[in-house]
């Protein structure tokens, strides 16, 4: 699992549904107008988005745009015409995957009456979709916590940080990794409902947080060259992690 932090630019955007926003005025795109793409341009856009999901899923958001262009079988100039900067492409992919995870969580919440079944269904669906490999940095950050850090009942978001000399990986307080994206906030909210239901039913360990659940999704979605091996490895790893999440009789 490779997640590399990136500055999230809102300067330019590609509108959903195959339209390109033309920024005008102050350069922030506030007065953008959209025009439909030609058939060949729309096809190139779809190739670029598919390639970006694959490349970023395999190598992390630190992968260069040239790798995306190569996978999409287009020139790197074509990628930059669709996405003026790498930040814009990263944001587009992360927002789409975050939205997909949120929909999966809502489906599990609405269709499963049993709290543990709802949580485990969400985890299995999310891991199988591979969306965990594309979680944005602001919701998935793992780091080395200082002594005296947040207790298990405090709201936490993992933070990814490289520390010289290594150290124990633990969850750090949310204040150090503020979530300011509406999509990410919606994901945290609905997953929080799944967690609270399972905890209240006594089926989830009391120290498990939303952060832990998102970390499970990312950890259980390895990127392997063989699709069958990847599916088998994900299923096996998730079974082990689910056992670790469940509460045990004292």
Image: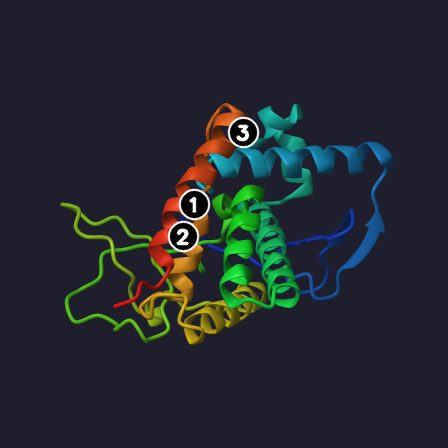
Which residue of the protein is positioned furthest toward the front in this rendering? 249
Q: Residue at x 51, y 23 (%)?
A: 226
Q: Are marks 1 and 2 in contact (CB under 8 Å)?
A: yes
- Counting from the top left corner in percent of width and height, residue 81 is at 68, 39
**Which quadrant of the rendered structure holds the N terminus?**
top left
Say which mark, if any, is on residue 242. Answer: 2
Q: Residues within 10 Å of mark 2 (few under 14, many from 20)?
A: some
Say which mark, if any, is on residue 222. Answer: none
Q: CA distance from mark 3 to mark 2?
A: 38 Å
Between disc 3 and disc 1, the foreground one is: 1
Decide: is 160 above or below 70.
below
Q: Residues within 10 Å of mark 1 (few under 14, many from 20)?
A: many
Of labels 3 and 2, earlier in sequence is 3
Q: Residue at x 82, y 31 (%)?
A: 40
Label 3 sits on residue: 66
Q: Residues within 10 Å of mark 3 (few under 14, many from 20)?
A: some
Which element carries disc 3, helix, strand or loop? helix
**Which quadrant of the rendered structure holds the C terminus?**
bottom left
Which element carries disc 2, helix, strand or loop? helix
Relative horizontal placement of residue 149, taking residue 91 as reference (left or right): left
Can you tell which quarter of the image residue 76 is in? top right
Relative horizontal placement of residue 63, taking residue 144 as reference (left or right): right
Residue 240 visible in the current orientation = yes
- Counting from the top left corner in percent of width and height, residue 126 is at 55, 49
Which element carries disc 1, helix, strand or loop? helix
Label 1 sits on residue: 238
Q: Residue at x 55, y 68 (%)?
A: 190
Q: CA distance from mark 1 to mark 2?
A: 6 Å
Relative horizontal placement of residue 4, taking residue 82 as reference (left or right): left
Q: Are marks 3 and 2 in contact (CB under 8 Å)?
A: no
Q: CA distance from mark 3 to mark 1?
A: 33 Å
């Amino acid at each position: 699992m490779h997640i590399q932090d990136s500055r999230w630019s809102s300067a330019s955007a590609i509108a959903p549904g195959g339209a390109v926003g033309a920024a005008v005025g102050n350069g922030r795109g506030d007065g953008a107008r959209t025009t439909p793409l030609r058939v060949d341009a729309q096809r190139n856009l779809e190739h670029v988005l598919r390639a970006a999901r694959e490349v970023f899923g395999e190598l992390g958001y630190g992968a260069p745009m040239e790798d995306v262009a190569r996978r999409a079988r287009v020139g790197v100039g074509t990628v930059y015409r669709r996405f003026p900067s790498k930040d814009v492409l990263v944001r587009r992919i992360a927002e789409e995957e975050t939205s997909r995870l949120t929909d999966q969580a809502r489906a599990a919440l609405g269709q499963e009456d049993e709290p543990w079944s709802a949580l485990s269904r969400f985890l299995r669906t999310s891991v199988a979709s591979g969306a965990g490999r594309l979680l944005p940095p602001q919701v998935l950050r793992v780091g080395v916590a200082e002594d005296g850090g947040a207790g298990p009942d405090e709201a936490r978001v993992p933070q990814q940080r490289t520390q010289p000399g290594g150290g124990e990986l633990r969850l750090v307080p949310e204040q150090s990794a503020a979530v300011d994206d509406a999509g990410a906030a919606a994901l945290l909210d609905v997953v929080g409902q799944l967690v609270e239901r399972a905890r209240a039913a006594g089926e989830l360990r009391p120290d498990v947080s939303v952060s832990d659940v998102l970390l499970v999704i990312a950890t259980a979605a390895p990127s392997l060259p063989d699709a069958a091996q990847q599916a088998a490895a994900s299923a096996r790893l998730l079974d082990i992690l689910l056992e670790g999440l469940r509460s045990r009789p004292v």
